[in-house]
Image: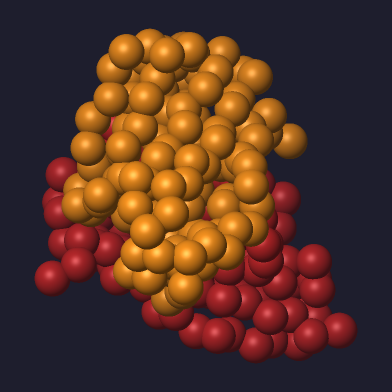
Amino acid sequence: QKEVEQDPGPLSVPEGAIVSLNCTYSNSAFQYFMWYRQYSRKGPELLMYTYSSGNKEDGRFTAQVDKSSKYISLFIRDSQPSDSATYLCAMSVYNFNKFYFGSGTKLNVKP
Amino acid sequence: EADIYQTPRYLVIGTGKKITLECSQTMGHDKMYWYQQDPGMELHLIHYSYGVNSTEKGDLSSESTVSRIRTEHFPLTLESARPSHTSQYLCASSEWEGTNTGELFFGEGSRLTVL
């Protein structure tokens, strides 16, 4: 069983839509939860970071963690064509040497 | 923008050749990593380093080797490439202390094709 499960998509939405991206995980020891965005032919870059449970908002992006359900989400409001990318969730225990990544969800926002 | 560079970006070689993928960062980060990324699959850690003269194998078994002689440089070498080594290789770095995110800064990747 994979440590982190993520729907690969692709997910195609019209510009302006609200997008919901999700990951589930099996290890209850995970405390740090991250979302990386990866544009085509580029390396991933950190988009959002959350510690433990709760919500975190940054502009059009909201990261949500539900540790009781072992479920994390990334919401994108007013999606733009420039949001078209692959979104990777990642998580770790307090040991930052080991990150567990999801397989990524490819998002396409159509103008 | 992250100051971490990988060369070559693309490489097509024949079976049995020796290759070295270069990775350099100018951020002074102590920790560096090599990940392997295949389409539709999660990133797999193949090597990491805590600092100079420190190297460790990651979760995914790999026939590659790494070295860390200088803080800024973390090359990956395959002595004899095989078609099964065809993949994208991502180098990353992070701070050892002073941050509570452990953010990974990635290079743009080296896409290796072995014929």
> Which chain is assigned red?
A
Q: Is residue B72 above or below residue B102?
A: above
Q: Is residue B21 left or right of residue A60?
A: left
Which percent across, then down, holds residue B94? 47, 27
Which percent across, then down, holds residue B104? 49, 36
Q: Nearer the viewer, residue A34 or B83?
A: B83
Number of dots carrying numbers? 0
Q: Residue at x 13, y 71 (%)?
A: A1
| Residue A19 appears in the rendering | yes
| Residue A103 appears in the rendering | no
Q: Nearer the viewer, residue B99 or B2?
A: B2
Q: Residue at x 15, y 54 (%)?
A: A27
Q: Is residue B33 left or right of residue B9?
A: left
Can you tell which quarter of the image residue B67 is in?
top left
Which percent across, then down, holds residue B47? 31, 38
Identify the image quadrant of the C terminus of chain A: bottom right
Q: Nearer the viewer, residue B71 or B31?
A: B71
Q: Is residue B42 left or right of residue A2?
A: right
Q: Residue furthest right?
A: A111
Tint applied to chain B in the drawing: orange
The color scheme shown is by chain
Which percent across, then down, holds residue A99? 32, 44
Q: Residue at x 37, y 46 (%)?
A: B78
Q: Residue at x 47, y 32 (%)?
A: B75
